[in-house]
Image: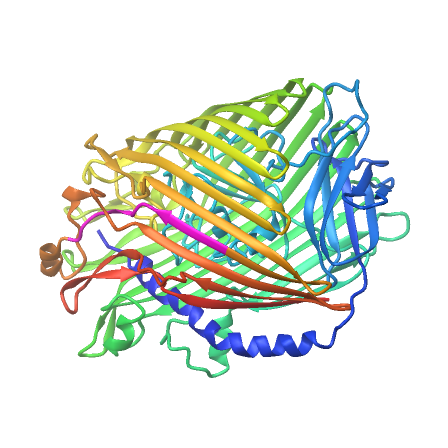
Amino acid sequence: MFKFILSSTFAASFIQITIFMKRLILSLTLVTVLVSSIFAQTNGQTVRGVVIDAFAGNPLPGATIVILDTNPIVGVTTDENGEFSFKNIQPGRWSFACSFMGFNSQSIANVMVSSGKESMLTFKLTEKVTRLNDIVVSAKSSKEKPRNESALISARAFSVEETERFAGSLGDPARMVANYAGVVTGNDSRNDIVIRGNSPMGLLWRLEGVDVPNPNHFGAQGTTGGPVSMLNSNLLANSDFMTGAFPAEYGNALSGVFDVNLRSGNKEKYEFTGQVGFNGFEAAAEGPISLGKGNPKGSFIADYRYSTLQFVSKMGMDLGTGTAIPEYQDFSFLADIPTKKLGRFKLIGLYGNSFIRLGRSFDQNEVSSHSQLGYAVDFGAGLNITALTHTLMINEDTRFKSSVSFQKSTSTTISDTIDYINKNYFTQYAGILDESKLSASTQFKHRFSTKNNLTIGVTANHYITLYNDSIYMKKYHKYISLTEVNDEQSLLLESYANWQHKFSDVLTLNLGLHHQYYDLNKENIVEPRFGLQWQATTNQTVSLGYGLHSQIQPRTTYFYKGYNDLTGQYSQNNRDLKSTKSQHFVLGYDVHLGKEFRVKAETYYQDISNVPVSKSNPEFSMLNNGSGYYIPTLDSLENKGKGRNYGVELTLEKFLSNGYYALMTVSIYDSKYQGYDQKWRNTAFNSNYAVNLLAGYEWKVGKNNFLTFDLRTAWSGGKPRTPIDLVASVAAGEEKYDLTKVYSDKFKDYLRTDLRIGFKMNGKRFSQEWGLDLQNVTDHQNIFGEQYNAVDRKVATVYQQGFMPMMLYRVNF
């Protein structure tokens, strides 16, 4: 079977994306020093926000918000729209608390107020079960508590600041969550999210309540990760990340959920952001939208980004990367349009495209430093997401939320072998994978009482698929078609119901069902979900969760055509494949030690069944898909495979206060699978353990400036390895593996330390920030993998990124 080479070539090429950042450091530092000297004084800034009911989302007029640790206490109340504002707040860290009769109080601690951009806060208050004591005596803070009230276990919220603060995250939420318990990293060139030993393909991406395809540049069809995220941190709001036993409203996913929210723009004034760094040159704008007399104010926010290396290359500079210039750009926006009687509308857009050319040179010395010797690859990808959501409040206890969206993802690939002597290329593989999706959903939420509420919903996804790819097979001396579908249409229907019962303010039960129907294989699945959370004391919580989760196969698998060399005919033998299923069992314990410290432990077991395996390749399992840039597919797969994941996780966390924070996560797990031969083997993701250590400190410099140091060390077990059979590779003239030793060995452990140094300067009307990310400061050689070079007939070790500095500069005004 054809061995695609995108994994090794992309890894080698994207190491080069940081080379130019070395050259930017000095020039950007000089520019920022000159610009910052213009602004010597600062004015106070405005902090705005809204207070809403966490369940229904309706505004809460009359809520009280105070600034903590002020004397005398500074406070305001919300208006009829649940909105509030504080004027003339000096730049720095401030903490806010919110209380409202009949609801649990909430605090948001250590908000960074800057002079260049107004701060926006959202308080989501949960209703009390017992209203006997409505006098608020203190504000409880749970920064990690998920925004979705139904997520009682294996879930936490994350903030936008964390995506930028944590060393090594580079403003990418996917790289940031790699620091959480249960998540393992081991590939510097991509942001794949490996959760509890599962393939990253088991992850569900959701954007503003809409399920979306892979939101990453250079993402192959059906995968969920990539080298550069399209999700821009300048537009993100606090969001949820779930690692198991997730609620009934989430479906068609096996491992976890990334539920991303976007923030609305400023409704009162125009604001702008300019930025340059690892992710590209960026420009962002936001401001009010006038909706006419009598209607609430609306807002917009938009951001455009262009590849740093592509820009510099077009300026005529030699980056030392040969033809391997990562080209990409993206545009994202959100228009928030509230109305007086018709509800609230949001129009969301995310558009991006990317392209890279690898190995297009007949100079062997140049090629060998950037990609696999003897191969050349052109790869392009595109994503188009347009969504409209509508929220309608019937009353304070009842809400409808609906959405419609159009989504389109494409990828094109040409893979050639190179004849360096005669200087020509021979196309070995070519493909175009194009898929459109029309999606519509509606959700109904109703609160019967303070103890009981119900959430029900339905989603319809209509897919239009165009897949055409082929490969040259030496033994047949001709090209063989792999997929050939044009405007193939299929329908995925999902529905769910979740009932939440609060026995008291300290004991909550979730019972849910999720139903899924896929018309391509006529499969119906009903999945029970369960969650229980008991707050044993004021600072201790015990949680229990169960869920049956299923996921349809990648459509490239369903449409794969098997070739019969005797008859010369094709047949689609995978169309009737059923979904892979996974049962999640989770037990958790969480204790807060005072206001600043937290300890959390979880243990879990996952029983996986209905996994597609192959009789002709008994070691194969779809559970290992997602370990590279493409989806390997075989003919005549059967749902006879199994898998199991189990482990324990520990989180020790010191929340940001008094200028510093610390986080340590430990994950110990085992991930195994059975192929057609029923032998238990390591999965491709079974690293067995992972430890993350993070810490940071923030100094106040002068009156309004801040210097930050953030450190991160990640240590995990080596990736499972299937050795290359050198003798067979030489005989075949291409890479061949020893399939008697699939994942029987491991590479050396992964170890990496990152350091981030940042400085924030607040001027009179501008705020500026620049950061220096020192990636892999110890220059530790982590192994990416092995590859066979047909030219020199040797197996070479491919290493991941060494020490690399990266620069970021941002200005807000």
- Give residue 183's quadrant in the image: top left
Q: Residue furthest right?
A: 293
Vertical placement of residue 642 versus 728, above or below:
above
Q: Residue furthest bottom?
A: 316
| Residue 60 placement (x, y as % from top left) | 81, 35
Pick whichever, 53 or 698, lies toward us: 698
Direction from residue 188 to residue 417 in the image, left or right: left
Direction from residue 504 to residue 294 in the image, left or right: right
| Residue 631 placement (x, y as % from top left) | 34, 48
| Residue 616 placement (x, y as % from top left) | 18, 39
| Residue 89 placement (x, y as % from top left) | 80, 55
User: In percent of the image, x 74 and y 62: which residue is there?
Assistant: 115
Direction from residue 81 to residue 562 in the image, left or right: left
Pick whichever, 724 or 437, lies toward us: 724
Q: How is the image coloured?
A: rainbow
The magenta stretch is: 711-724
- Give residue 426's quadrant in the image: bottom left
Q: Residue furthest top?
A: 503
User: In which quadrant will I find the C terminus?
Assistant: bottom right
Q: Can the viewer see residue 36?
A: yes
Q: What is the number of callouts on the image?
A: 0
Vertical placement of residue 728 versus 503, above or below:
below
Direction from residue 632 to residue 790 in the image, left or right: left
Q: Can the viewer see residue 227?
A: no
Verify whether residue 719 appears in magenta.
Answer: yes
User: In percent of the image, x 75 and y 32: which residue is there?
Assistant: 138
Verify whether residue 203 appears in magenta.
Answer: no
User: In percent of the image, x 50 and y 82: which residue is there?
Assistant: 315
